[in-house]
Image (tube, rainbow, N blue to C red):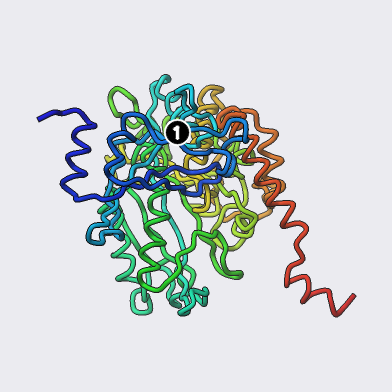
Amino acid sequence: MSDDPREMLLRRVAADNVAFVNLQFTDVLGIGKTVTIPVEELPDALDHGVWFDGSSIEGFARMVESDMYLVPDLSTYAVVPWDRHEGMITARLICSVYTPDGKPFTGDPRNVLSRMLDQAAAAGYRFMVAPELEFFLFKTDPNGHILEPHDKAGYFDVSTDLATHIRRQMARTLQAMGITVEAVHHEVAPGQHEIDLRYADALRSADHLVTARVALKAVAQINGLHATFMPKPMAGVNGSGMHVHQSLLDVESGKNLFADPDDPYGLSPLARHFIAGLLAHARGMCVLLAPLVNSYKRLVPGFEAPVHISWGRTNRSALVRVPRITAGRYQATRIELRCPDPACNPYLAYTAMLAAGLDGIKRKLPLRDAAEEDLFHVDPRARGLATLPTSLGAALDALREDEVILEAIGPSVAERFLDAKQQEWESYRAYVSQWEIDRYLAIF
């Protein structure tokens, strides 16, 4: 029996009685896209790719350069658990996008991350990440209209947590698709939940995140609910973040290069340079990590979201936190970046984080002293701390000024991302909200 990966995949597809295959990719904003083919077309798709019109995809191509094709990554094969109807079983393969001349399309976010990971590997590093995915569940009416939060529970609550069974369904669904779930629990706000994914190399982790957002919405819908990854769907309560734990491993030995048991924080000099790079580029990469107008209504004081560009261990208002590890388990040493939210394009977000950290290592940037006090209750100016951008517009300006991050994502993605987000910002600025009507109409 052949060990050829193509033949092994085709045998597995046949054993699973698959009828259709979803070929998935993302646009520049991280929105999932799918081309579905009958299983009979899969051999040709594996040999020659599947052509599509890129001019209709957000941020992909202009009309004059529209023809592109999808190349499936065989390692991403999974049967879609919620689409197992008799005779209609559907599998999925995540794809990278290629141009007619057979080269990776520079505007494909997955290719952008792959290129950045290749640079890291050439320097001897393997970038590992583990995201904490937060989201809200809302009730819906029979017409699908979104209503109030699904419950009124709080952090780790049990008795008032109505979604315990649903979260378990979600975990099982992700596990069925090859995604390892480490923990699930209720979060601080009513209707808010968290699912923590296990450490993986950055490309696989980004694939898992794109998959998870689709899967969690599907499970919620089956239960008559709506799952949203909108960072701040309700005022006055905590928003949804996506804290990203990260470390660098040695490519050859697999050793955690962030660990140093003799350091007060357990951090190696390389880890300290990496953190310094994250802090140095925090403003420039922020719009890739928190990409919506709504994202900046989460990044405000008082709701456990970072505002000031700082680091620490016990301080959960810090931008970068160093979690404690069990004594002797130095391989678990990691850092946690707390400003990303679950609406981000994970391929571009991980690219930016890695580029920032590697720049810190390359330039041997010094790491300032940790800020362990709660920064929400001190004057950050006394500590000389800068702040993250306070709006999408300010974040876009910061990206335009950060040459390291712009180079990492490449001119094709930078141009299209900035253009799309500038349009979003201008549309928001021109919109007259109900808050303004309520506040000003009767007075002025």
Q: Residue 256, how many percent across, how many down?
A: 34, 32
Q: Residue 220, how many percent across, how many down?
A: 39, 67
Who's the residue at 34% across and 26% down the image?
250
Give the quarter of the image for residue 134.
Answer: bottom left
Q: Residue 223, how many percent across, how many down?
A: 36, 72
Quadrant position of the N terminus in the picture: top left
Who's the residue at 62% across and 35% down the image?
63
Tell me if residue 57 comes above or below residue 212 in the rendering: above
> In the image as oriented, which residue stretches furthest toward the right?
444
Q: Which residue corresponds to mark 1? A: 69
Q: Residue 126, how many percent across, how many down?
A: 37, 29
Tell me if residue 288 comes above or below residue 125 in the rendering: below
Quadrant position of the C terminus in the picture: bottom right
Who's the residue at 43% across and 77% down the image?
151
- Comparing 281 with 70, the one in front is 70
Who's the residue at 46% across and 62% down the image?
135
Tell me if residue 216 comes above or below residue 401 in the rendering: below
User: Are there few (<14), some (14-19), or many (20+) residues within 10 Å of tag 1?
Assistant: many
Give the quarter of the image for residue 369.
Answer: top right
- Comparing 293 with 261, the one in front is 293
Q: Is residue 373 left or right of residue 16?
A: right
Helix, strand, or loop for circle 1?
Answer: strand
Residue 384 seen by the camera: no
For the image shown, how many numbered marks are present on the structure? 1
- Name which residue type carries label 1: Tyr
